[in-house]
Amino acid sequence: MEWCDAGDLEGVMHALAKRGERMPLPLVCHVMSGLLAGLAYAHQATDADDKPLGLVHRDVSPGNVLFTYAGEVKLSDFGIARAAERLVSTGAGIVKGKAAYLSPEQARGETATAQSDLFSAGIVFWEMLAGRRLFAGGETREILARIGGAEVPRPDRVREDCPASLAAVLLRALTASPSDRYPTADDFARELSRVRRQEGLDGDAEPFALFLRQTVPPDSRPASRPVERTPALPASEPGPPSPLKIRRSWRVALGIAAALLFIVGGAFAGRWLLAPSKPRAVPKSAAPLPEPELTERNAVVSLAKTPEGALAVLDGRPLGFAPVRAAVTAERRRRRALRVTLPGRASYDANIYLTPAKERRISKRIRLAPEMTKVPAVDEDRMVAGRRVRAGESPYLPNGLYRVEDAAGAVSYLRVGD
């Protein structure tokens, strides 16, 4: 088993919630792309004869999305996964998986499909964007009832910087009917990729690795963490008891003897079977940042009032995502170039000076203006997003999607910027 040294999404979201922060949009999309790639691989798995296994994960949740400090995203724990060819009935009325991440059909006790996994992935997507649970609180039956109705607040209303196009991608995955969702995880991933390019939300492993080291530093994580297993949740009506009961004492004795033999054999094989795999070396590009402490040669740069999720870069070297506090080497009378960037916004550039053994606080609120694009002149007056644009006028508009209405009332849409 591969060792994922940066923990799981549940731990990252918990760390962000304690600080009152949310994951930057480009990194949310990066995590979702990795999650969907893992689901696509599982759903398309075949046996030795290239026959589809029909594998369904059935437990897509933040605790099963793992990270490495190299910025990789892994989907784990197929412990309750179902293959169509080898489905074993667990009795009527038994629901597998964590209650808050079930699909509506699973909440009704129906058979899980690949579209069920996509609904669960959509819940994870929504929670990363919003920074809170989607179906939380109350008794299990209440949670299942809310899931059954697919009561989902629009993410672009929960989070102001979420584009409407990204919200539309997510909401399709969270529709109540499986037939209205994406046909496959690949289709979900392709639509997400298209919107990422359109909205400038591209992100890769390197900034995500930096984000992980800032959010959950290696020295802050425990050496090992027990994995909690959620028991099966009873549905509204329990199934009938199994007619198979062991009544003869010799069968019980035989079972105990077999268990003892298994334990004795496991004692000899334990070292080889259970030995943890050797952790992979982290690339130099993902090396941990120095601790933000003052020394005779270091200074600390802190930006607390930049827009949430903006990337701060000093002399071409990433410092971290705002709010950020990082230690850097300082030299007197040396001018340093600071840049703050956020997708879809014009970057902020400034020159600063650092003094050894002192902290340089960027206390001014940095406001990143939306990127503007000049719109070609129109041949007649039109209403663009409620604003009248007269014939021959070529205004500058913030990048985005606009509703256009001509004098006759015909409606079209204009994409400004790439």
Image (spheres, grey):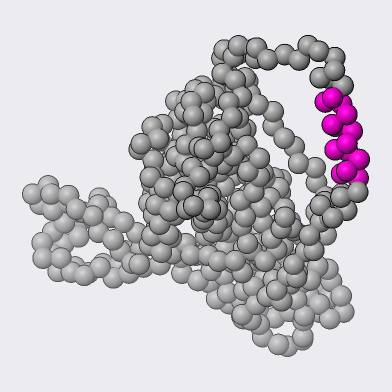
Indicate the position of residue 180 as horizontal and vertical percent values.
35, 38
Q: Camera-side residue: 242 or 202?
A: 242
Indicate the position of residue 2 as horizontal and vertical percent values.
71, 58
Q: Residue at x 63, y 43 (%)?
A: 78
Q: How many marks?
A: 0
Q: Residue at x 84, y 71 (%)?
A: 294
Q: Camera-side residue: 316 or 288?
A: 288
Q: Residue at x 59, y 14 (%)?
A: 239
Q: Camera-side residue: 285 or 385?
A: 285
Q: Residue at x 72, y 55 (%)?
A: 1
Residue 263 located within the stretch drawn in magenta: yes
Where are the magenta residues, as a range? 254-267
Query: Can residue 360 be seen in this snapshot?
Result: no
Snapshot quadrant of residue 215: bottom right
- The residue furthest front is 250
Q: Quadrant of the C terminus?
A: bottom left
Query: Can residue 86 be seen in this snapshot?
Result: yes
Q: Is residue 202 left or right of residue 67?
A: left
User: Image height check: is 144 above or below 39?
Assistant: above
Q: Is residue 110 left or right of residue 4?
A: left
Snapshot quadrant of residue 143: top right
Residue 236 located within the stretch drawn in magenta: no
Snapshot quadrant of residue 142: top right
Indicate the position of residue 46 as horizontal and vertical percent values.
50, 51
Indicate the position of residue 288 as horizontal and vertical percent values.
75, 69
- The residue furthest bottom is 333
Which secondary structure dominates the residues rendered in magenta?
Answer: helix
